[in-house]
Amino acid sequence: MQTENSLHPEGVEPRGALCVECLVSLAAPGERVLDRTGAALCRACAADFYAPCEACGGLVPRDEALERPDSGALNCFECFGKAAAPDGSEALTDEEVAALVAEYVALHEELKRLEGRAVEVKEQLKRAATVRPRVSNAVVLRADSGSVRCSYTSKAAYDAEKLSAAEALLGAESFSALFERKVTFSAVRNRLEEFLSSEDDATAAARDAVRAAESRTEVATLTVVAQRKKKSS
């Protein structure tokens, strides 16, 4: 990666005559480059330990650079916060984020209250429907403002061990015409990660097969952090 600082030099005030990394003297102006804050660096340290910010061009320590999830570009802290969101929209300011957080927390509490009450009302309406006649296996409850339908469906579950007796009596072909066998897999996460990180040649092909069968998606989950209650004095 190219490490030459493309930040406009007039926008950065040089400070120090020694490289901040290796402390070598930088007497000649051509021996040094400046990081994004104006700290002097020798060219060797700049190449080894620094990278240019994709947005402003200033050199930033590699271990402090932030990688953009959409493009993989490296940014300094300020540019990472200012850069556009992955969908192309402008990034929100801290004040806008704070306002949205406050609004979301308030809405979250209201939604919990409404959801809890909705569950209570639904259970009461279901009980009311049980003593009313069904039409097409459903009961319609009406009010001046609208109506709700309480429908009834049947779901059956089968014990696999007990059902195997029927399979033995019918035979595999006749049984498969009546029942569909489904198999799902859930990873034992810790063991699987340990297996995939192994370097055992004997299981290399199996590791490749598992990786080929795997597909991952990232899911963002937003939760409200409960505030600690203040201790009463």
Image (cartoon, grey):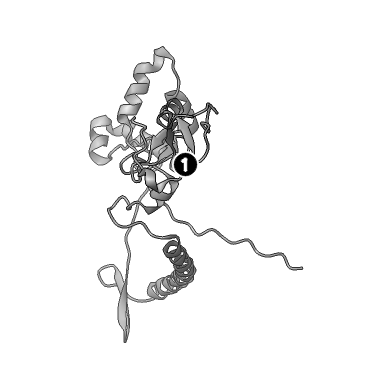
The quadrant in which residue 29 appears is top left
Q: Quadrant of the N terminus?
A: top left
**SS of the residue at dot 1?**
loop
Q: Pick out the residue farthest to the bottom.
A: 144
- On the image, the x and y values in percent for residue 138 come to 29, 70
Residue 33, quarter of the rendered image: top left
Q: What's the residue at 35%, 33% (across, down)?
A: 4
Give the residue type at disc 1: Pro
Where in the figure is residue 34, as x and y percent of width and height?
A: 43, 37
Front in this rendered view, residue 19 or 78: 19
Nearer the observer, 144 or 16: 16
* Residue 23 appears in the rendering: yes
Q: Position of residue 217 (x, y in %)?
A: 34, 42
Question: Quick check: 2 left or right of 120?
Answer: left
Q: Residue furthest right?
A: 233
Quarter of the rendering occupied by the C terminus: bottom right
In which image quadrant can residue 57 be found? top left
Residue shown at the point (30%, 41%) measured from the top left:
71
Residue 116 drawn above or below residue 25: below
Q: Residue at x 42, y 25 (%)?
A: 196
Q: Residues within 10 Å of mark 1 (few under 14, many from 20)?
A: some
The x and y percentages for residue 22 are: 53, 27
Task: Kindly tell me whether residue 220 is visible in this rendering.
Answer: no
Please state which of residues 37 and 53 is positioned toward the viewer in this rendering. 37
| 205 w.r.t. 1: above or below | above
Which residue is at the front of the view, 137 or 21? 21
Q: Which residue is mark 1?
A: 14
